[in-house]
Amino acid sequence: MKSDDCHRSSWLRLPFFLFLALCLVACGGGSATKEEVEGSEEGRVLWEAGEQYVRLNSSDRAVDNQHPAAVTAEEMRAALESLFVPERRFIRKKLNPIFSPGEVQVLSAALAQGLALARPDQDITFVSIGIHQGTFAKVRKANTGRVFFKDDKLHIIFGMLHHEVRDQDRETGAQIDRRLHPFVVGSRLYETKLSHTVALEEGQAFYLDPESGEEREDWLVLDIPTLVAKPDQNTPDEHIDPTLLEDIARSKQETQNLKEDLANVKEVLFELKEDLLELQQGGGYATIEARLQSLKKLYDNGLINRDEYQVKRRELLNEL
């Protein structure tokens, strides 16, 4: 009988505890609301395509960014299109845009969206891959970094800049594992030594490290009003489709680039022809030192492989 009373008492207390639990949930109960969870979401993906992405992140000691920031997609486009790097083609250097048209189209919208959503302790990180003209053919190049708005300026810290992307290792031919060779974004904590240096123009500057007093060439500080206010040298006809105008301008630029490249090829081939004649003659005015230099130039330009270079080099050294 006493056992039945205990069971009956337990069942009577059960609704009370359920009611108490529901009250705690309704009042918050120390748990986050849906809005709080969404607002503090880390690594939120704003855009993604294969290995490429634009994300919100709160690492890297970001605490006092001016976020959310009202930077429009058009202003972001102007900032991205203003960035160039000097690259060598054959024996000349020329300025090439950091971001391809495809990269600009995607990043201008995604980065502007990220700045509008970010908190003061968040940055926007990105990995983008564009198709760029190489020495002989078009190549895939990666740009990575983090973006934030601070002190009324747009900041970009690059982790990779025009880094050639390959699916296979050039020497071994093995498939590249991105877990071992990831796309690394830039950081406030250390300077990344880039293979290229951005060519600065008005409205652009390198970040000055207050501790070392030195500029960081991986960290750009951009004044958007100055970049947006730059006059357009090519005023478009208002009756022509802007997309068509862009295609025409791109075609003209590519044609000009091809003409310059062809002139460079002719110049290089002329020099290599003289070098080949010197190697074949093996005498006359061609000294051993000059022949070694010519041999090295042939190797550097990919006209002979490493084994051929080593064999011929030993032959020339044996003549000393």
Image (cartoon, helix red, strand yellow):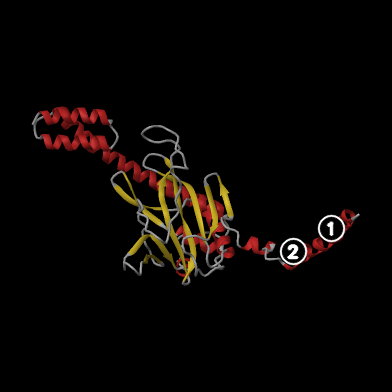
| Residue 250: numbered disc | none
Q: Residue placed at 77% from the left, 62% from the top? A: 21
The residue singled out by tag 1 in the image is 10
- Which is more toward the observer, 152 or 13? 13
Examine the rendering and report whether any part of residue 235 can be seen: no
- Which is more toward the observer, 151 or 94? 151
- Which is more toward the observer, 7 or 30? 7
Q: Residues within 10 Å of mark 1 (few under 14, many from 20)?
A: few
In terms of secondary structure, where does tag 1 sit? helix
Residue at the far right in the pictured view: 1
Residue 41 in the image: state x and y as whole percent: 60, 59
The residue singled out by tag 2 in the image is 25
Residue at the far bottom in the pictured view: 151
Residue 139 in the image: state x and y as whole percent: 43, 42
Which of the 4 image quadrants contains residue 26? bottom right
Q: Residue placed at 31% from the left, 67% from the top? A: 212
